[in-house]
Image (cartoon, rainbow, N blue to C red):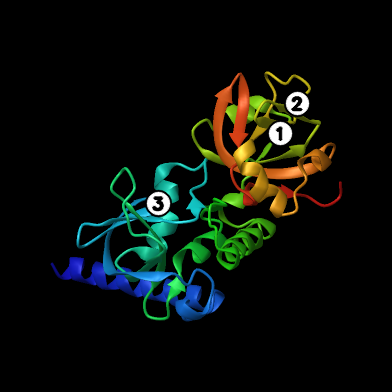
Amino acid sequence: MHRLDTMHELKQRLIGALLAILAAVVPARPASAGPCSFESQGEGHVAAIIDGKSFRLTDGREIVLAGIAPPADAENGNRSAALAAILAGQDVILRGQDDAPDRYGRQSAFVFLTPGEILVQELLLSQGGALASADVAERDCAGLFAGAEAEARQGKKGLWAEPTAIKNAEIADDILTGIGRFVVVEGRVLSVRQAGATTYLNFGRNWTRGFTVTISRRALPAIEAAGIALKSLENRRVRVRGWVEARGGPRIEVLRPGQIEVLGGN
């Protein structure tokens, strides 16, 4: 029993030391005064880590981290480890615009460690433990997530240390291994075509087998409002993120402007 108590104390000390380091890397700030400053959805104590972006509180609620996606190529244990290092056994504050559960009964939230209200999503992204999912509507919050991910990408931290972290748009078979997962793809747009209510960004010469991005007519106003003229993307290098599906070749449907990033050096 004494040995178990000692191991528990050592674990708690290690977690405390890690949080102190993280707090130094990402300075604490009141959530009400910074990005992602949404309404409080309550507080809780973390009882268990479920996967790379969700966890369970002691009151039974299952929480999914809003605005991020776990890396597609990592094993589930590796995805969970990054989140566990930050959240295991911690007290948290939940914030968000809506506390209604999703179809799986999970509550989506922006999660802050206490004390200090350190944003968990920002920590994960800055360490390369997750991808920004580009589905955060609030501009400052979305910008915070994009900046944290860019910091990790440039420093080759976490998932960005792997050469497969960004898929090559020219290698369709490689992208197809990520069917049903959230991935990041980079490449040159060879052509932009419209058929009915859908605009297609084609990255391969064989349209039916190469990588393609689709944009529905209903998504166009938001994309154009963000300053992205789709026709101007021809022959330009872009970075696209989203869920991979197979329609002959691999496809990603773009629903929001944040899913497309025009790269420099075109």
Which x, y percent locates residue 78? 44, 48
Say which element carries label 2: loop
The crowd level at tag 2 (other Cα within 10 Å; few <14, some 14-19, many 20+) is: many
Q: Are circles 2 and 1 on residues that touch, CB within 8 Å?
A: yes
In the image, 176: left or right of 68?
Answer: right
Where residue 249 sits in the image (x, y, percent)? 63, 22
Name the residue located 59 percent from the left edge and 36 percent from the top edge. 253
- Left or right relative to 217: residue 206: right
Q: Type of residue at label 3?
A: Ser
Residue beneath disc 3: 80
**Does 113 appear above or below 228?**
below
Q: Tag 1's secondary structure?
A: loop
Which of label 3 and label 2 is nearer to you? Answer: 2
The label on residue 169 is 1
Type of amino acid at the residue the image marks with label 2:
Gly
Residue 8 seen in render: yes
Are the two marked residues, 3 and 2, in contact with CB atoms closer than 8 angstroms?
no
Residue 226 sits above or below residue 185 on the image? below
Q: In the rendered image of this protein, does residue 11 appear above or below residue 51?
A: below
Q: Residue at x 61, y 18 (%)?
A: 248
| Quadrant of image for the N terminus | bottom left
